[in-house]
Image: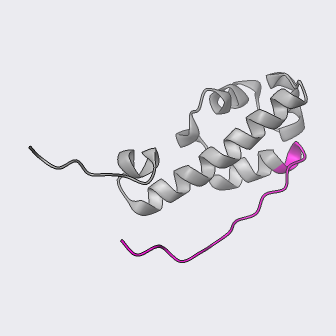
Amino acid sequence: MASRKRFTSVWDAIEDSAAEAASMRLRAEIATRIIETARARKLTQSKIASLAGVTQPRVSDLVRGRLDLFSLDALVDIADRIGLRTRVVVTPKRAA
């Protein structure tokens, strides 16, 4: 029986490189916080779009998880415009 490779996250399993996986993990975290905040504040997609300076279809892409359509910069901007503060914590990689 062939051994199965284990991954730290789903992004490590589906992305071509560790760098792409790291970027997607960050994008997913920011997008999740944007969506959670919008739901807690009962914001419609149109209201989020208005606050964030983007179109409603762009917000729809975000809500539907189309993270490949967003850069980290774009998500940080959206988060800031709806009242979220973002920060990045950089740490050494763990030994394999």
Q: Position of residue 59 (x, y in %)?
A: 72, 30
In the rendered view of the protein, which quadrant contains the N terminus? top left
Left or right side of 85 for 91: left
In terms of depth relative to the viewer, which is nearer, 45 or 58?
Answer: 45
* Residue ranking furthest to the front: 1
Left or right side of 30 for 85: right
Principal secondary structure, stretch drawn in magenta: loop
Task: Read off the magenta span.
Answer: 80-96
* Residue ranking furthest to the left: 1
Q: Position of residue 86 (x, y in %)?
A: 78, 58
**Per the image, is 86 magenta?**
yes
In the rendered view of the protein, which quadrant contains the C terminus? bottom left
Picture layout, residue 16 above or below residue 82: below
Q: Quadrant of residue 10?
A: top left
Identify which residue is drawn at 61% across, 49% down: 27
Q: Position of residue 94 (x, y in %)?
A: 46, 73
For the question of whether residue 49 can be seen, the reply is no
Identify which residue is drawn at 76% across, 25% down: 56
Identify which residue is drawn at 84% across, 40% down: 52
In terms of depth relative to the viewer, which is nearer, 24 or 4?
Answer: 4
Q: Position of residue 23 (x, y in %)?
A: 54, 56
For the question of whether residue 33 can be seen, the reply is yes
